[in-house]
Amino acid sequence: MNVTARSYAMQIANFSYCVGAALAQANAIMTGWRIGAKKYEECDRGTRKAVIYGLVTATCFSAAFAITGHFIIHIFTNDTQMINLMVKLLIVDIFLEFGRVTNLVYGQALKTSGDAIFPVIMGAIFMYLFAVGGTYFLGIHMGLQAVGAYIAMAADECARAVGMVFRWKSGKWKSKSLVEL
């Protein structure tokens, strides 16, 4: 039941994810253009703006799905246990999307600027520590199963988002240009 609930919850959450992914890609295009024009302040403002729009939109979508979860989930099943589990997952998804949008936008902006190694290394380390370690600890050891795995995924996204924000604010990306004019 946990695997099925997680699968359904992820399908519903993909609507929120699409917003963040689209904003991250659009911002990456604008970031590349602005870096090429050496308009670093505009680049910074645009990236912050994309994160804010993404956070508001993804949080609204995720909150709406969590609030209306009982109704939405009836499309898939009438099993009360499954419905209750999926609603819990959709509530955790609010926090997961909060971190994911920030991580996507800043991560793509860093990669576009030429600072691609930082997001890759950070992703590898944090995914292993938080997603794998957290899923084992919360999901298996603490017995939270799918909810524990979702909490671990949310912690991973939020921790990486914090790292991406700090890296962006450090300004090191300004010296990592991919093209010299």
Image: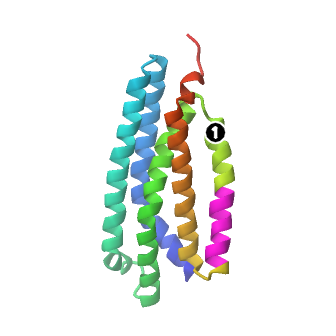
- Residue ID for mark 1: 118
Amino acid beneath label 1: Phe
- Position of residue 39 relative to residue 136, above or below, is above
Work out whether residue 107 can be spotted: no
Q: Residues within 10 Å of mark 1 (few under 14, many from 20)?
A: some
Q: Main secondary structure of the magenta part?
A: helix
Please give the range of residues in magenta.
127-140
Q: Residue at x 67, y 64 (%)?
A: 132
Q: Is residue 16 left or right of residue 117?
A: left
Q: Residue furthest bottom?
A: 80
Work out whether residue 61 can be spotted: yes
Residue 15 appears in which quarter of the rendering? bottom left
Kind of element beneath mark 1 = helix
Q: Is residue 69 left or right of residue 171?
A: left
The colour scheme used to paint the residues is rainbow
Q: Is residue 36 left or right of residue 64?
A: right
Q: Residue at x 37, y 32 (%)?
A: 45
